[in-house]
Image: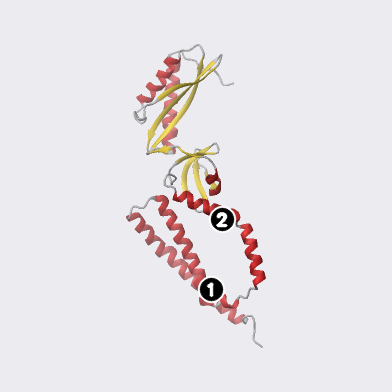
Amino acid sequence: MDNQFPLPGDTGIQLITFVVVVSVIYTTGRFVFEPLLTALLDTGGVEVTLRRTIEQIVHAGVVLFGLYTALTLSGFSQSINITGPFLAAVTLAVGFAARDVVNNLVSGVFIIADPRFKIGDWIEWNNNTGVIDDITFRTTRVRTFDNEIVSIPNSELATSAVTNSVEENRLRITSEFWISYKDDVNVAATILREEAKALDEILDRPEPTARVMEVNNSRVQLQSRIWIRDPSRQDFIRIRSVYLSRVKERFHEEDIRMPPAW
């Protein structure tokens, strides 16, 4: 009578063969082929988002190729006997468990394929703001103002309103100011524009703007819009801080009062 299962000695040889083949293929791919591919992509000037996507695909391909080759050469693929009903049950269970994963993968493909959504972009989503640090097929990692890395499921970004604040390497900085109802709105608006033009890091085109956004019986709300070039998190915080400080000093010099928040 033939044995359905391999002898312990055979299993040990198969296991050793499997581990050796996986280790050799993975090590070769990880430390030889993948660095060579990265160097070729860098030399070719491939955009960073596309480059990382290619690297992720190649890395996954190396792992799958290693597992498939190891199973084939070790003989595990022939010795493992799984019945049809059991395989169907496992497939069904994995399918239900992987619905969110598949959804994120599909969303990740569309995000990566979008040329206006790439690493380094400044985005706003669901009342959050940050710079895209990395895009994978499952999640998008964003660095916030607090220097925290937030991993967002791609399906969330694909189904939410996402604002890309960076356009043609420019970032708009919007600030709001409340002044007393009795103060001169024109003078306050002029200060906002003048202090923006006084800073070399704030662009002249588009021109800084200052508008009245709201008026009530005790306060007036002004909004200023300025643009900076080649924005980064550090530049944003520093330039915005300098601008707000200069506006505050000018308001004090012109005796323009900023009422406390309600």
- Measured as percent of width and height from the top left, residue 58 is found at 44, 61
Looking at the picture, tell me which residue is in the foreground, 66 or 149: 66
- Measured as percent of width and height from the top left, residue 219 is found at 53, 16
Residue 123 visible in the snapshot: yes
Disc 1, SS: helix
The residue at the point 38 percent across, 50 percent down is 47
> Which residue is labeled 1 in the image?
71
Which amino acid type is marked by label 2? Answer: Val
Q: How is the image coloured?
A: secondary structure
Q: Quick check: marks 2 and 1 in contact, CB under 8 Å? A: no
Figure quadrant of residue 10: bottom right
Which amino acid type is marked by label 1? Answer: Leu
Q: Residue 147 has which mark?
A: none
The residue at the point 43 percent across, 13 percent down is 254
Figure quadrant of residue 44: bottom left
Sequence-wise first label, 2 or 1 = 1
- Measured as percent of width and height from the top left, residue 186 is found at 42, 15
Residue 135 visible in the snapshot: no
Q: Nearer the viewer, mark 2 or mark 1?
A: 2
Q: Residue 102 has which mark?
A: 2
In 3D space, how far apart are the residues under numbered discs 2 and 1 (Cα atoms)? Answer: 25 Å
